[in-house]
Amino acid sequence: NQQKIEDFVVEMLLHVAKHEPFDPESYMIQYIQHRRAGKPPPSPGRSRKSSRKQADSGNRVAAPRLTVLHGLCDTQEHTEAMRHFLTNWVDDTEGKAMLAQAKSRSAKPRKDATIFESCQSNVSNRSVSTAEFLNWDCDVLAQREETLLRWSVAVFEEQAALEALDIDQPALEEWLGVIQDNYTPKSQVPNPYHNFKHAFNVLTVTVLLLEGQGAAYCTPATKFAALMGAIAHDVGHPGFNNDYFVKTRHPLAIRYNDNSVLESMHASVAFELMLNTPNANFLRKTETSTYEVIRKNVIAVILATDMKIHFELVQQVNALGQSQEPPDDKAKDLVLRCLVHAGDLSNPVLPTELYCQWAYRVVLEFHHQAEMEKKRGVPFQPFMEHHPDNTLELAKLQCGFVSFVVQPFWNAMVGVLPHVQTRVDQLGVNLKYWQAIKAEEEEKAKKVAEAGQ
């Protein structure tokens, strides 16, 4: 029986490798369902392979390519649904015992939402050249988290004035390790989008924005705060947004009075991990005045990632960009808050191939939330309902998101940081890409409708 299980899994993985579905986990669940029912393997739907062929047939920018191994790495801890299907498929006692043992290892419940595991960071001391990843073309999703952790250390070593600020570097490395660990606590399944890879991407974009004119808006202490806030801005993220916690009257929403629920939690956890993890308090030797500046600004940049204040930030940055006055403290505080927020909204300004990968993941997370809200009988946002394999709805969502949310913000940022104009240009390329996808899918739908009449 064990040999049959192994043969089945190998066969399934070969199908995944052959078809390269966008969502390997969902495809494997469908594969198990079909095989249990005696049906042939399911169609992968819109796969990465078919998307590449589609892009290669015209002048459109190539669609995203994720390797199968990369897709499987992100789902190596079985979801509850995957475990359910596997358990039902395995009839023999030995197989069920193996699955139960695996589940008990990976799904131990946490006693309290504020209690996070500590870990030894074991960050490699191998020298790292930041030039290989501090650029707009770096494929963060293709990297292992261990690599990103090592790169994070290198960023702080190179970009932050650690010695001048009396930052304890070994403790900082320990803190970075527990931050990475707590983006996916051991009792949870990794989020498709809000994970350490997203955090690292925001960190690198923050650094890139600080180049050139960005440096004029920071002191060593506030720059460190921006980097610290960037890497920790989503730590402990549960994969659901603020609205979900408010609607379900979750204890986190009660604790933070329905106001910036997750952002408040992320900021709190960042400091809790520093203070409560052995050998991780990297600010213990820092002067009180410097500590206060860092803490104040870490909290500020994380709270500024709340989308409820997005349009307020757009108006303020527009006004700042049109001002002829040299930046005062208020202007510097505003730009600092916008750096991490811009990093959080940077997917659409990346090369199209990278943007598509991130877009798929965030929409998949939206879909998971909508499905959960349906189960719990609470209202859900219609735009979050569709699975990202629904190409037309994915394209519609991206067109609206770029046009009404991202583009106004990044256009305003150019007035303050002119060197980001190249990213606004890329944003325009990406918008045209999604508009072309949308038009193509709408034409397909029209033809299908006409054929059915």
Image (spheres, grey):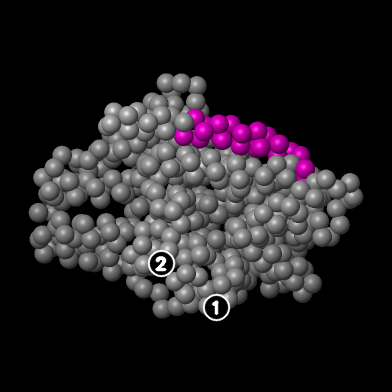
CA gap between label 1 and label 2 equals 20 Å
Q: Residue at x 75, y 71 (%)?
A: 292
Circle 2 residue: 378
Q: Is residue 422 magenta?
A: yes
Q: Is residue 39 visible?
A: yes
Neighbours of disc 2 within 10 Å: few (<14), some (14-19), many (20+): few
Q: Residue furthest right?
A: 325
Q: Is residue 14 magenta?
A: no
Neighbours of disc 1 within 10 Å: few (<14), some (14-19), many (20+): few
Circle 1 residue: 255
Whole-percent x and y of residue 71? 37, 45
Decide which of tag 1 and tag 2 comes sooner along the chain. Answer: 1
Quadrant of the frame with the N terminus: bottom left
Horizontal side of 50 relative to 163 (left or right) equals left
Q: Residue at x 55, y 54 (%)?
A: 199
Q: Magenta stretch?
A: 415-438
Foreground of the two, 139 or 42: 42
Whole-percent x and y of residue 271? 61, 71
Q: Quadrant of residue 218?
A: bottom right
Q: Is residue 119 visible?
A: no
